[in-house]
Amino acid sequence: MPGILLGAAVTLGLVAFVHRRRRHRRCGPGPRRGRGGPRRGGRAALRYVFHRLDTTDEQEDVIRSAIKQLRARARELGSERDLTRDDIAVLVRGDEFDEVRAGEMFARQDEALRELRKAALDAFTSIHAALEPDQRDQLAEYVERWRRRGPRLGPYRTQWA
């Protein structure tokens, strides 16, 4: 008799555990730590925003595509960072400051930044078009709240430590 009761208790506990895990996956990420809230990285933060905005699959596809294209464009411009670092090293190392080379470096940076701005505007335009007015309001409130809170640095850290 005790073996049957113990077996039933273990089975019920296992069923409750599996059900709880599935429920959290189905409902989307929650605000609790460790459950995929906005602190867990890019994809988890995006899932959190989708959950909060109650987006459709089509809206999520458009938003993911826009963000993916923007990230790809920013990644392509990473080579400019290396070129700028090399140019600065040459400018510092030289006997005299080469203003022409510095001007070329800044012109190259301006062009790269112009391309990145265009990619960002394209992404923002497609995201804006995909969302409903109330979803845009909720997203704006989320962005404003993040600005007020700033980055979360932990209980024993300050921004200047």
Image: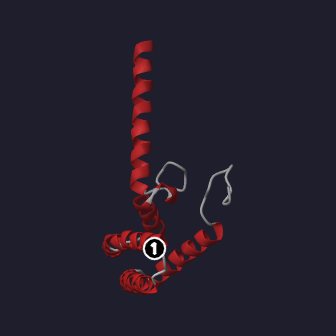
Q: Which one is in front, 139 or 148?
A: 148
Q: Position of residue 50 (x, y in %)?
A: 42, 67
Q: Is residue 99 above or below residue 3?
A: below
Residue located at (34% from left, 76% from top): 66
| Residue highlighted by disc 1 | 94
Q: Position of residue 8 (x, y in %)?
A: 41, 24
Residue located at (69% from left, 49% from top): 156
Q: Quadrant of residue 131?
A: bottom left
Q: Which one is in front, 118 or 111?
A: 111
Q: Is residue 38 above or below residue 2?
A: below
Q: Which one is in front, 69 or 139?
A: 69
Q: How is the image coloured?
A: secondary structure
- Residue 86 in sight: yes
Residue located at (61% from left, 59% from top): 152
- Residue 54 in sight: no
Q: Position of residue 56 (x, y in %)?
A: 35, 71
Q: Position of residue 157 (x, y in %)?
A: 67, 52
Q: Which one is in front, 142 or 39?
A: 39
Quadrant including the C terminus = bottom right
Which structural element holds mark 1?
Answer: loop
Q: For the residue marked with disc 1, what is the amino acid?
A: Gly
Q: Quadrant of residue 149?
A: bottom right
Quadrant including the N terminus = top left
Q: Is residue 62 above or below residue 115?
A: above
Residue 56 located left or right of residue 139: left
Disc 1 packing (10 Å; few <14; some 14–19; many ≥20) = few
Q: Is residue 29 above or below residue 116?
A: above
